[in-house]
Amino acid sequence: MVFTMALSFSCEDSTKELSEIIKDRQEALGTAANIRMVYTDSTKIQAILTAPKHVDYTNLSFRYAEFPEGLKVIFYDNLERENEVIADYGILYNDTRLVDLRGNVRLQSHDGSLLTTSQLFWDAESEWLFTEKPFRFEDSDYNFEALRLDTNKEFTKFQTGSLIGTVTVSEEKDSLQ
């Protein structure tokens, strides 16, 4: 009799409790090593991402993917010129299409311009870059450091905090003299 009672208690429906436990779990859906992802649009390669480790959390309500050992992304502009981003750590938020790059972030453009910082956000939807961290930007016309950056991917429109460095400015003569 005691055995039957113990058996009936151990067989009770614990679905509700189990679902509560699983709901709070923050474990990864999967982990991959030495990955290479190719992003295409209409059979045209947009970017190639390589990383030593990829951890997939797309099973959570706020889906994301993590690159805890760094990543390298080669992305191509409209003229198929290569631009490269390297970081020690990265996280991609799937729903917002926001990428958070951290640690020794280097963005090298096809024309030789170089942006370095400790953290850089990339809004893939609007193709916009921003950071609140100190950064350094160098190209043929500029060599400066600043705190805070807000720019388009071509660096043709940008806002910064206070600048330290050299900026080349060209001035045209007024033709109405």
Image (tube, helix red, strand yellow):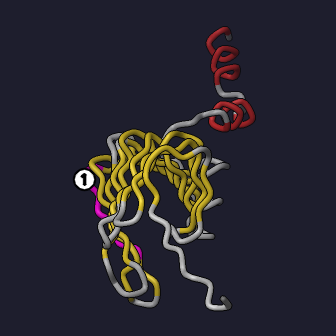
Quarter of the picture holding the C terminus: bottom right
Quarter location, residue 18: top right
Which residue lies at the image location 41% right of the left edge and 74% below the top edge? 39
Q: In the rendered view, tell whether residue 110 sits above or below residue 137.
A: below
Q: Nearer the viewer, residue 175 or 70?
A: 175
Residue extending farthest front: 177
- Circle 1 residue: 34
Which residue lies at the image location 70% right of the left edge and 19% below the top edge? 9
Give the x, y percent position of residue 142: 42, 59
Quarter location, residue 40: bottom left
Which residue lies at the image location 56% right of the left edge and 47% below the top edge? 131
Label 1: few (<14), some (14–19) or many (≥20) C-alpha neighbours in 10 Å: few
Quarter of the picture holding the N terminus: top right
Residue extending farthest top: 2
Q: Amino acid at mark 1?
A: Asn
- In the picture provided, is 172 more to the left or to the right than 126? left
Give the x, y percent position of residue 70: 33, 45
Q: Nearer the viewer, residue 138 or 36?
A: 138
Which residue lies at the image location 34% right of the left edge and 84% below the top edge? 80
Quarter location, residue 110: bottom left
Residues drawn in magenta: 33-39
Q: Nearer the viewer, residue 143 or 79?
A: 143
Q: Secondary structure at mark 1?
A: strand
Give the x, y percent position of residue 7: 63, 20
Give the x, y percent position of residue 120: 50, 49
Q: Please identify the dominant SS of the magenta region.
A: strand
